[in-house]
């Protein structure tokens, strides 16, 4: 039996978001080693602050400074930190109610035991304090972590105007998912064919449609598919878009065109980049063929074949 295919995959989408007055004050305050919450109409102090009361939906603007010390209200041990987490050694994720706050903040708790960090050093009710990052930029990571600290609770929260020099007005929020993908029988056969510069799909035994890439089952009829069908490699552009924003780590100059392509013999359009033609000359019905990438594992892009454009009626059902 052949070994199943497996490959690491990363889905990453870093984006930048602007900050309103409350979040701007909170993150700028962290840069200045000041923790701010927001006070509700009934006197509760919410940390981290929000711009609208979660109970009444009223707009919140009154800021209050709370202490850098607090109490653990709940926790979970993390024995194997992952890339990008606050600490590289085992630590606890903890909900911490800072003195003066009425809600809890989620952050990392560095809890060293007698020899190494361990869950025996953590408990609900443990008193802790903020360990500030040596370099602070106006982000939640300005709190490097929390650490145990023997102190008496201080319940006071004092009013704060929230004004700082050079306020933080936007943050970059990276989103990333690392996982290992196993394609399964249908996709595995498709990938093996691509390595030989062939494109195969699978035909539904009920509706007779051919799906590329194959899914192992017909999405319309819900029955298993097994019959392999070679399609393409030429196809027709059904719809497309012009990309004007350069993606990070993608060595393609903008503008370029990404299109849905109905391969000859297939009943489902796949997507691919169009090259070898000015972006403003790409059109619906354009006939294209694959140009294989280095190593031949997949088409790098599609280029015009020079054939006459396909008639609209031949691909209108695949839009």
Image: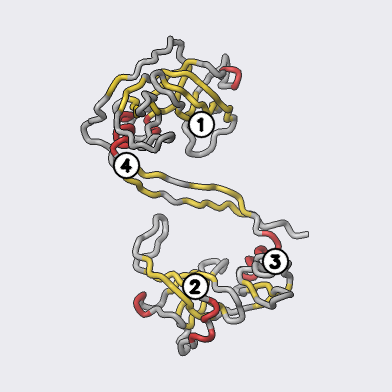
- In percent of the image, x 53 and y 19: which residue is there? 112
Numbered disc in front, either 4 or 2: 4
Q: Is residue 148 above or below residue 315?
A: above
Question: What residue did someone put label 3 on?
Answer: 222
Query: Horizontally, is 7 left or right of 131 in the view?
Result: right
Q: Is residue 310 above or below residue 135?
A: below
Residue 260 badge: 2
Pick the residue in front: 225 or 230.
225
Q: CA distance from mark 1 to mark 3?
A: 46 Å
Residue 85 in the image, given as x and y percentages of width and height: 49, 35
Quadrant containing the N terminus in the rendered view:
bottom right
Helix, strand or loop at label 1? It is loop
Pick the residue in front: 265 or 65.
65
Q: CA distance from mark 2 to mark 1?
A: 44 Å
Numbered disc in front, either 2 or 3: 3
Residue 182 in the image, given as x and y percentages of width and height: 65, 55
Pick the residue in front: 137 or 58.
58
Question: What residue did someone put label 4 on?
Answer: 19
Query: Horizontally, is 38 left or right of 1 in the view?
Result: left
- Kindly check if marks 4 and 3 are in contact, taking CB atoms under 8 A apart as contact: no
Question: What residue did someone put label 1 on?
Answer: 88
Q: Please identify the residue farthest to the left as the structure is shown.
A: 165
Q: Nearer the N terminus, badge 4 or badge 3?
A: 4
Query: Horizontally, is 293 left or right of 251 in the view?
Result: right
Helix, strand or loop at label 4? It is loop
Q: CA distance from mark 4 to mark 3?
A: 46 Å
Q: CA distance from mark 4 to mark 2?
A: 37 Å
- In percent of the image, x 58 and y 27: which residue is there? 77
- Kindly check if marks 4 and 1 are in contact, taking CB atoms under 8 A apart as contact: no
Q: Nearer the N terminus, badge 2 or badge 3?
A: 3
Q: CA distance from mark 4 to mark 1?
A: 30 Å
């Amino acid at each position: 039996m052949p070994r199943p295919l497996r490959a690491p995959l990363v889905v990453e989408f870093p984006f930048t978001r602007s900050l309103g007055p409350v979040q701007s004050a909170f993150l700028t305050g962290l840069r200045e080693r000041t923790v701010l919450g927001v006070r509700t109409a009934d006197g509760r102090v919410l940390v981290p602050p929000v711009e609208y009361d979660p109970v009444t939906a009223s707009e919140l603007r009154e800021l209050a400074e709370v202490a850098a010390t607090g109490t653990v209200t709940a926790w979970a041990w993390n024995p194997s930190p992952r890339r990008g987490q606050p600490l590289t050694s085992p630590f606890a994720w903890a909900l911490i109610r800072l003195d003066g706050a009425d809600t809890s903040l989620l952050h990392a708790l560095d809890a060293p035991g007698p020899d190494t960090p361990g869950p025996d050093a953590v408990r609900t009710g443990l008193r802790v304090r903020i360990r500030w990052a040596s370099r602070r930029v106006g982000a939640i990571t300005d709190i490097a972590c929390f650490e145990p600290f023997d102190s008496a609770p201080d319940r006071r929260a004092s009013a704060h105007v929230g004004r700082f020099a050079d306020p933080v007005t936007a943050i970059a929020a990276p989103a990333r998912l690392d996982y290992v993908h196993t394609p399964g029988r249908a996709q595995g056969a498709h990938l093996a064919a691509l390595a030989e510069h062939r494109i195969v799909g699978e035909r539904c035994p009920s509706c007779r449609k051919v799906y590329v890439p194959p899914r192992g089952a017909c999405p319309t009829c819900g029955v298993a598919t097994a019959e392999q069908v070679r399609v393409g490699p030429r196809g027709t552009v059904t719809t497309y878009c012009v990309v004007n924003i350069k993606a990070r780590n993608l060595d393609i100059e903008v503008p370029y065109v990404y299109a849905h392509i109905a391969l000859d013999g297939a009943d489902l359009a796949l997507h691919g980049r169009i090259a070898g033609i000015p972006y403003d000359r790409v059109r619906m019905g354009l006939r294209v063929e694959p140009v294989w990438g280095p190593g031949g594992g997949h088409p790098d892009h599609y280029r015009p074949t020079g054939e006459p454009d396909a008639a609209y009626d031949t691909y209108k059902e695949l839009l």
